[in-house]
Amino acid sequence: MSEHRYPSADVAAIERVIRERRDIRQFSAGQLPEGLLGRLVEAAHRAPSVGYMQPWRFVRIATSSNREALWRIVDQERMATAASLPTRAAEFLKLKIDGIREAAEVLVVALMPGREAHIFGRRTLPEMDLASTACAIQNMWLLARAEGVGLGWVSFFDPEAVASLLEMPPGSHPVAILCLGPVAEFPPVPVLETQGWGSRLPLDEVLFEDRWRAGAGGTPTAY
Amino acid sequence: MSEHRYPSADVAAIERVIRERRDIRQFSAGQLPEGLLGRLVEAAHRAPSVGYMQPWRFVRIATSSNREALWRIVDQERMATAASLPTRAAEFLKLKIDGIREAAEVLVVALMPGREAHIFGRRTLPEMDLASTACAIQNMWLLARAEGVGLGWVSFFDPEAVASLLEMPPGSHPVAILCLGPVAEFPPVPVLETQGWGSRLPLDEVLFEDRWRAGAGGTPTAY
């Protein structure tokens, strides 16, 4: 066993939070505990980033007019998605896909402008800027769960509409609307599973040895 | 305080692992503890995914010939990156950018084929498949750190060369070569910072309120 290993109780806490984190769309009334938002952004900012570029930028939505405008952008995309689904449009429209109006806090996460200058680790995989930013959001997600606070990553939006609303400079790109706040519960099973939109794949369908397993395809859709 | 909050010692462990996780390129001899690789892949597989698509696939590299072939692909990209840097090519070439030959385990992570059928949460942001996969890798990264095991995400490679080597089907796309194994140390500060390739931005340079801060640009490069 490694001398660098954390105490077993700490390892168990980390496995627990990984298991119990949920993508939350249903929030209760109330605010975040004092100081928590700063700690959550700090946790995100501690993420790894390709070539140390730290491509993430966070815009905290403070005014209700901005919140309402964001909600409208999301609702428009919700309708467009329903219209695009091959089946189950009506069922989709019954799903709650965001908590923008109710959540204690809303953050928009964007990739910074000027990313093309950063070629360290990105020459052939420029999308690593997004990968780094997703690692940052996952840090925040896990800490929020441990603090008993729900987080939902909403990706139903036209990025140009969000960029325009928040006066983002050319070259920046919003990738997430994060809703954060108190919740009545963290569902034991993801809501999309309960509602029949997917189920956890068996581990052996995602793990191969030395080469792709012949014939292994993508996850099937439920629509 | 939320009734769903973890005990303070557990929250502290989660903040500690977020702070102490490092991107590792320097490995010691030795194997992973029995059973850990499975737990690490399980932790990754517990990540959130857009529309529950679970787009991640892991290929464990078992043969030394595959490892050597991967290393050659990475070394080729290392040379190409050096040639592309505006300055500091010689310094870059002195950096150790991977541990493919020495690490206890090497995993290639790829996006599955058939992703275009998954439009739930991806109609306007198709790149959310990569975001989900990065969340999965961050889960693995944090658990590995808590277990005292180093992990490095190598993104210096031609994705087509890796796809061809591992017989990946059309439409799949490799996004990471992960090196995992015992380490002599977890550096207190990221190596890229020690070596002058970047430094952690002050938090107020990445956090804005209600709109982008006028004039706020990208992180400067160090080359």
Image: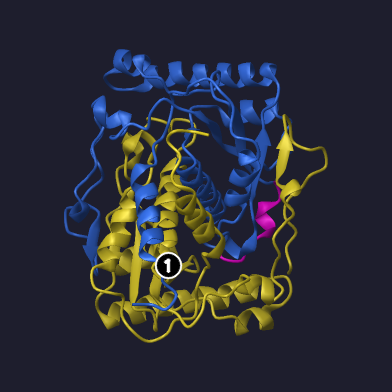
Chain colours: A yellow, B blue
Work out whether residue B46 or residue A70 is closer to the camera in this orientation and state it: B46
Question: Mark 1 = which residue?
Answer: B6
> Total of numbered circles in the picture?
1
> Looking at the rendering, in which quadrant would you find the N terminus of chain B?
bottom left
Residue B167, horizontal then vertical, whole percent: 74, 31
Work out whether A18 lies above or below B68.
below
Answer above or below: position of A129 versus B60.
below
Q: Is residue A26 left or right of residue B159?
A: left
Residue in view at x 70 percent, y 29 percent: B166
In the rendering, at what x and y percent does residue B28 appear? 48, 21
Q: Camera-side residue: A159 or A207? A: A207
> Are there few (<14), some (14-19), or many (20+) residues within 10 Å of tag 1?
some
Choose between A193 and A118: the one closer to the eye: A193
Is A215 situated left or right of B158 in this image? right
Going by the numbered disc 1, the residue's amino acid type is Tyr
Residue at image point 62% right, 52% down? B45
Residue at image location 39% in from the left, 53% down from the top: B13
Q: Residue A112 in the image: x percent, y percent? A: 31, 50
Give the answer, above or below, for where B43 lies relative to B219: below
Main SS category, magenta section: loop
Residue B198, position in %: x, y?
A: 25, 34
Q: Residue at x 31, y 29 (%)?
A: B191
Host chain of mark 1: B
Boundaries of the magenta span: B113-121
Whether residue A111 is visible here, answered yes or no, is no
Q: Viewed as shown, does residue B18 lie left or right of B27? A: left
Q: Can residue B26 be seen in this view?
A: yes
